[in-house]
Amino acid sequence: MPDSSFEFAEQLVPLHWNGLILQVPPDWTPAVLDGRYLLAEAGDVPVMEVKWQPIQGRFSVAKTIRKLAKGVQGAELFIDEKDAQTPPVPEQWTEAVTRLEERGFHVKPIFWRASDLHEDAKQSPHISAGRGAVVYDPASNMAWLIQFYETGTGSIKEDAAKVLLSLRSPEPRQWLPWQVFGIRFQSPPWLELMRHAFNPGRYRLEFKGRGWHNATRLVLERVGPARAVLRGAGLREWAESYYARELTSMKPVEGRPQVAEVRWQQLPGRVLQRGGRACVRLSMDGQMILAVFLLNARVAELNAFQEIDQAYGIV
């Protein structure tokens, strides 16, 4: 755990996305999200870019760095921090790298800067330099390319060291944590991200079962504000209209009527032994509608639905 020299004035917040597990300042928010790519901004200024992937076979730092260098247009990339052309390595950065290595990570620091800087670069809002690292965890075979950007108007190197130190590797064959844009979730190891969308008023994550012929699907949605969406309608009435496609072939689960939660299920068939379960509920504060649909799932997967549902919420 980091000591007091790595504390922020403001508490760090989790940023967890598809195998990326970090803690970042609260004003760092994702501007671009892909399957294994994230670009974070503070305000309108890029501050961090991360690419990551599981490694098959032998990991090559040199190959990974070459890929990174291709993505840095109009810039000089320095791999050896002892190079005379590089600026002094901040003490906190060196300490963060050392601590990651003590935890079993392989870390290769990098530095790059724009090759066409002018004397008035301080007035430019564009990125002028960056410090980063190639990180590899042999325990999980996961590799990360992390770049922290600096602009002509300021430096984030102290923040970068603290964020780098917060990096964690996903546990193999364990539930994977997610936390982004105010939602949290844990996905079981038999699911992988298929697509996602974060639109105003509606967030949607779709997962599929691992394997080419695995038909299992999981859909998570956050819709709101609830009062504006429902417009006086009951939760079940609204959900059966709004989610007509997802609820096809499902029947309401009978039980005590709930104002803030409704459920459906499709019992597994005799031949394919696949079914579905669904829950649409209000968040604890009543401000948002949370929906969970497990579709075309095997019996063992259906048995995990309650745990999946409980893992999904807002922060």
Image: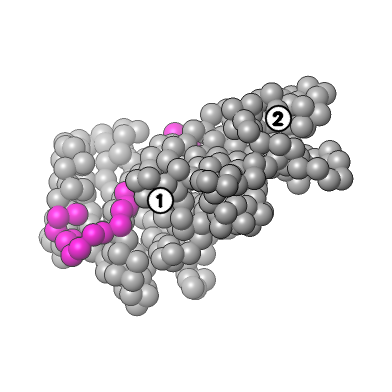
Q: In this figure, which colouring scheme has been used for the structure?
A: one colour
**Considering depth in this image, is 8 or 175 the residue closer to the camera?**
175
Taking the spot 52% from the left edge, 64% from the top edge, the residue there is 7
Tag shown at residue 13? none
Residue 163 drawn at (x, y percent): 43, 58
- 195 vs 266, left or right, is left
Residue 11 shows in the view: yes
Q: What stretch is highlighted in magenta?
A: 43-64
Q: Which amino acid does label 1 sit on?
A: Arg
Indicate the position of residue 142 as horizontal and vertical percent values: 32, 61
Q: Name the residue under label 1.
A: 210
For label 2, the residue is 239
Image position of 224 with respect to 113: above or below: above
Q: Do the residues labelled 1 and 2 touch (CB within 8 Å)?
A: no
For the residue pair 52 and 282, the one nearer the viewer reads as: 282
Residue 186 visible here: no
Taking depth in this image into account, of 84 and 272 the one nearest to the observer is 272
Between 315 and 149, which is closer to the camera in this rendering?
315
Residues packed near mark 2 inside 10 Å, few (<14), some (14 to 19) or many (20 plus): many
Q: Which of marks 1 and 2 is nearer the N terminus?
A: 1
**Residue 267 at what x, y percent from top left?**
64, 45
What residue appears at the point 46 percent right and 58 percent down from the top-left corner? 189
Neighbor class of circle 1 (other Cα within 10 Å; few <14, some 14-19, many 20+) is some
| Residue 198 belongs to the span the image colors magenta | no
**Looking at the picture, does residue 169 appear above or below residue 213?**
below
Residue 168, percent from left and from top: 43, 64
> In percent of the image, x 57 and y 47: which residue is there?
270
Q: Which residue is situated farthest in the front direction here?
A: 271
